[in-house]
Image (tube, rainbow, N blue to C red):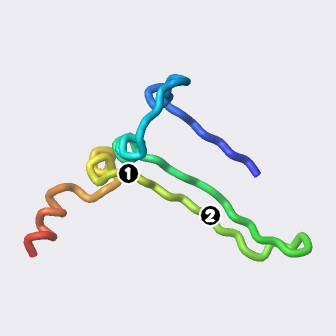
Amino acid sequence: MTTEATILPEARLAGDEHISLCETLDRVLNAGVVLVGDVLISVADVDLIFIGLQVVLTSMETARNSGMGPPASNLVRERES
């Protein structure tokens, strides 16, 4: 099993610094997080099920600014109809 993590310098905390859950969630939603993983179920060295997972957790504003979400104009039209 291989695990990789990249922590941006601005996301690092000093050793004695503590932050609340609310502030942590705010940082995650503002920056965005991508989780990628694979699950492989085998019996007697026979691969039965392979599941590839990719999860993106971010705010709509961050997604829109990075080009992942729908443009704001589409959201306004959907609400009006």
The foreground one among 1 and 71 is: 1
The foreground one among 32 and 77 is: 32
Q: Label 1 is placed on what type of residue?
A: Thr
Left or right: 64 with respect to 41?
Answer: left
Residue at coordinates 18% horizontally, 55% vertically from top-left?
A: 72
Residue at coordinates 31% horizontally, 56% vertically from top-left?
A: 69
Q: Quadrant of the C terminus?
A: bottom left
In primary-sequence order, the first of circles 1 and 2 is: 2
Left or right: 37 with respect to 12?
Answer: right
The image shows residue 20, relative to residue 70, as above or below, that is above
Residue at coordinates 44% horizontally, 27% vertically from top-left?
A: 10
Comparing labels 1 and 2, the label whose residue is closer to the camera: 1
Residue 18 position, x and y percent, is 47, 32
**In the figure, residue 50 lies in which quadrant?**
bottom right
Q: Which residue is mark 1?
A: 58
Residue at the farthest right position: 44
Residue at coordinates 58% horizontally, 62% vertically from top-left?
A: 53
Counting every numbered tag in the picture gives: 2
Residue 17 position, x and y percent, is 48, 27
**In the figure, residue 74 lies in which quadrant?**
bottom left
The foreground one among 71 and 42 is: 42
Q: Label 2 is placed on what type of residue?
A: Gly
Q: Which residue is mark 2?
A: 52
Residues under numbered marks 1 and 2 in contact, where contact means CB atoms less than 8 Å apart: no
Q: Secondary structure at mark 1?
A: loop
The image shows residue 18, relative to residue 73, as above or below, that is above
| Residue 22: numbered disc | none
The image shows residue 59, relative to residue 8, as above or below, that is below
Q: Secondary structure at mark 2?
A: strand
Q: CA distance from mark 1 to mark 2?
A: 20 Å
Residue 31 position, x and y percent, is 39, 41
